[in-house]
């Protein structure tokens, strides 16, 4: 899993975590709060807040505010609500540097400690407000009381930048940068198909559920002309076999998990601290893949169910239907021992494929990879139609399924076993370009910037 401290508990954990039954496997999930003592990667979700000047309706008890215009909002966690308010410690004309938060969830802001108060000058437009390392909460989900840990990030500037009369929900981002980041995960370590499997569930949108399966917003994935990466959202799911999870072992929570050649229905319940994997063995059709991905996600058109395929074998089989590729990861090692990990996401031009009962289907993706250079819609030269001396170019690399390469990272052999933080990974060489006239004369050259 993410944290090496669990390695010492493997024998005991394996003995206690598994509850086998004739219908499948039930694994106990463990709540894990991130602390300073735990080393290694700390995956987390985050959400930006959208406060307003009027207090939300409800039976709330409010303190006396220094500002005549505090901002209010409700942080929804599972089935619970937590009111918060942003105030100014020095009254009108100054920065919103105080946070009232209903930490105990009793709908009363007067009996909780005030967070912040004062800023740390940074020399930039926004200055950070000191916040506690973590705030621990309890909330309700599916009839259970569960723990949760968050970190608040607040940076602000004097509201004189916009003026007192212009304070509103729409101008709020101009003088306050406030977001909430999760400080906890659910983890499990278990045996499956003769392999030790580590999993980590991340509450990506900070709503306390941890188990929201991957969905695609097709309306947000359309563009007038330019191809776009599909707008995917859902809680993140890390999985690694035989080692700790690293930052690059992430995917999304899906409805099904196919490990090599065996398919399981996946059910996640933080309220019951349970991960259920029930085998699916009937009504399957063979799926032939053009490559051997480390992981790959498919979505079925009829019911939007998603399948996570981990190291799928040549005899992998899935339920019949029309599927589209959403994302995948490929591995390749070079002559210097660097393991290159290539991550892609599908675009709005990625087509569906048919997996027919009995006959199965073929999914082509990946190589040959093709560089695609275009002038994006946001380029001034394209938007205005004027003659421009400066032209913005965008480089993408696409596969045969019209998917985009979104990340390429290299990991040395010595760094592979424990999950590599981003700053230890090896980025690829920066691509360069040359622009030639029809006669072959070069008129411009340079390098693309990554990101």
Image (cartoon, rainbow, N blue to C red):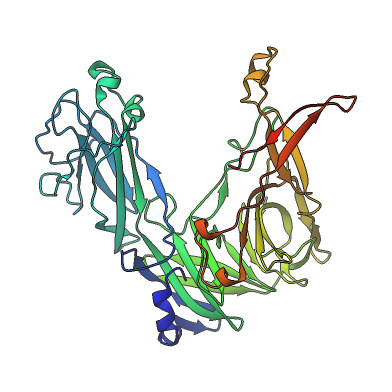
Query: Relative to 262, is 104 above or below?
Result: above
Residue 310, quarter of picture: bottom right
Residue 252 vs 265, above or below: the answer is: above
x, y percent for residue 161: 29, 21
Residue at position x 46%, y 63% from top? Answer: 201
Q: Is residue 277 visible?
A: yes
> Considering depth in this image, is 125 or 185 the residue closer to the camera?
125
Question: In the image shown, does 292 or 97 lie closer to the viewer?
Answer: 97
Residue 430: percent from left, percent from top: 66, 45
Name which residue lies at 59% across and 64% down: 256
Q: Is residue 365 above or below residue 108?
A: below
Q: Nearer the viewer, residue 36 or 64?
A: 36
Tally of numbered tags: 0
Residue projecting furthest to the right: 439
- Please provide percent x and percent y for residue 30: 38, 72
Give the camera-side residue of 234 and 345.
345
């Amino acid at each position: 899993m993410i944290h090496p401290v669990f390695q010492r508990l493997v024998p005991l954990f394996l003995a206690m975590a598994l509850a086998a039954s004739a219908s499948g496997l039930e694994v106990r999930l463990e709540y894990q709060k991130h602390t300073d003592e735990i080393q290694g990667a700390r995956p987390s979700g985050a959400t930006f807040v959208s406060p307003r000047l009027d207090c939300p309706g409800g039976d709330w008890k409010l303190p006396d505010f220094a500002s005549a215009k505090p901002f209010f909002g409700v942080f929804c966690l599972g089935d619970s609500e937590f009111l918060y308010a942003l105030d100014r410690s020095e009254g009108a004309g100054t920065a919103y540097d105080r946070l009232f938060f209903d930490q105990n969830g009793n709908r009363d802001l007067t009996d909780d400690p005030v967070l912040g108060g004062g800023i740390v000058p940074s020399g930039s437009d926004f200055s950070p407000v000191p916040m506690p390392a973590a705030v621990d909460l309890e909330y309700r989900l599916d009839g259970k009381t569960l723990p949760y840990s968050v970190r608040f990030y607040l940076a602000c500037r004097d509201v004189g930048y916009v003026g007192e009369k212009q304070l509103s929900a729409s101008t709020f981002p101009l003088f306050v940068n406030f977001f909430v980041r999760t400080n906890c995960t659910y983890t499990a370590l278990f045996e499956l198909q003769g392999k030790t499997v580590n999993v980590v569930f991340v509450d990506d949108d900070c709503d306390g559920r941890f188990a929201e399966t991957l969905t695609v917003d097709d309306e947000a994935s359309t563009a007038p002309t330019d191809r776009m990466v599909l707008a995917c959202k859902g809680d993140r799911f890390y999985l690694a076999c035989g080692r700790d999870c690293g930052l690059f072992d992430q995917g999304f929570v899906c409805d099904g998990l196919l490990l090599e050649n065996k398919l399981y229905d996946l059910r996640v319940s933080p309220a019951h601290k349970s991960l259920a994997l029930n085998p699916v063995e009937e009504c399957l059709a063979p799926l032939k893949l053009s490559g051997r991905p480390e992981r790959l996600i498919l979505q079925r058109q009829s019911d939007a169910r998603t399948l996570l395929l981990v190291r799928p074998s040549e005899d992998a089989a899935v339920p019949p239907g029309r599927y589209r590729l959403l994302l995948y990861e490929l591995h390749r090692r070079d002559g210097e021992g660097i393991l290159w990990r290539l991550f892609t996401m599908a675009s709005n031009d990625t087509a569906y494929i048919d997996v027919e009962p009995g006959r199965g289907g073929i999914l082509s993706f990946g190589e040959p990879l093709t560089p695609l250079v275009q002038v994006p819609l946001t380029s001034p030269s394209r938007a205005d139609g004027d003659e421009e001396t400066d032209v913005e170019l965008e480089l993408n690399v696409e596969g045969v399924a019209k998917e985009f390469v979104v990340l390429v990272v290299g990991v040395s052999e010595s760094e592979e076993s424990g999950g590599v933080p981003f700053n230890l990974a090896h980025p690829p060489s920066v691509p360069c370009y040359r622009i030639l006239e029809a006669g072959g004369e070069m008129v411009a050259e340079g390098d693309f910037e990554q990101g």
